[in-house]
Amino acid sequence: MRSDAARNRQRIFDEARGAVIGGETALTLNELARRAGVGVGTVYRVFPTQRAMRESVLEEAVRELIDAATVADGYPDPAKALIDFLRTALLTALARPGLTDVLITGSDETDSLHRAKGELVEVTSHLLARIRPAPALTGENLLKLLCGLIHAVSEHPAERQEVAIDNYLDILRAGLAPTL
């Protein structure tokens, strides 16, 4: 890739990231091109659709969750590993509007996001296996539960979200107590 093309691609991605993280769900690709200072055709080569743009930006957050789960999996205490991962995941999701939608959606437009979500299910399944939960609690179901927690926490005022996270994780811990 030519250096100017690489710079354009990075500018497009940086502008898209800022918009998505800033909660701009209606950003058009034409507006993205204007902000990045490139032609609209250049943007369409990077992101063929608005959904592909959102997925590409939020895939970074999914990969951060994979890394967080992998780190937590190294903890000697499996209960602490799971709860610490969930806390990190909640904080990550609150900082990335739209992540819940990406996690809960079964059909992904980009193959790389689909693969990343599969990796996330694998690593969370491994975290769960360490605590030996009921068979119904799978990595995939844990991610759906996480989406519910994200929604519940986001309903609280920003200054109360940390306390809400602690409270919801205490409830989850109590529900898993027979396995922890």
Image: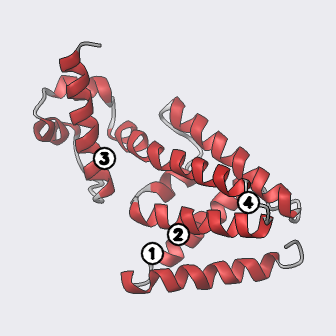
Q: From the viewer's perspective, is residue 39 above or below residue 89?
A: above
In the rendered view of the protein, which quadrant contains the C terminus? bottom right
In the rendered view of the protein, which quadrant contains the N terminus? top left
Q: Which mark is residue 150?
A: 2
**Residue 3, image x, y percentages:** 22, 17
Judge the density around disc 4: few (<14), some (14-19), many (≥20) Cα neighbours within 10 Å. Answer: some
Q: Quadrant of residue 14?
A: top left
Residue at image location 84% in from the left, 56% down from the top = 129
Q: Are marks 1 and 4 in contact (CB under 8 Å)?
A: no
**Residue 122, image x, y percentages:** 72, 44
**Residue 5, image x, y percentages:** 22, 19
Q: Gap between marks 3 and 2, in whole Å?
A: 20 Å
Kind of residue at badge 4? Tyr
Kind of residue at badge 3? Arg
Q: Gap between marks 3 and 1, in whole Å?
A: 21 Å
Judge the density around disc 1: few (<14), some (14-19), many (≥20) Cα neighbours within 10 Å. Answer: some
Residue at image location 86% in from the left, 65% down from the top = 133
**Residue 173, image x, y percentages:** 74, 78
Closer-to-camera residue (166/108): 166
Q: Which mark is residue 154?
A: 1
Task: State the residue position of label 3.
Answer: 17
Closer-to-camera residue (133/34): 133
Give SS at disc 2: helix
Give SS at disc 4: loop
Q: Of callouts 3 and 2, which one flags the residue occurring earlier in the amino acid sequence?
A: 3
Q: Quadrant of residue 50?
A: top left
Give SS at disc 3: helix
Q: Which mark is residue 92?
A: none
Q: Gap between marks 2 and 1, in whole Å?
A: 6 Å
Which of the two discs, 4 and 2, sits closer to the camera? 4
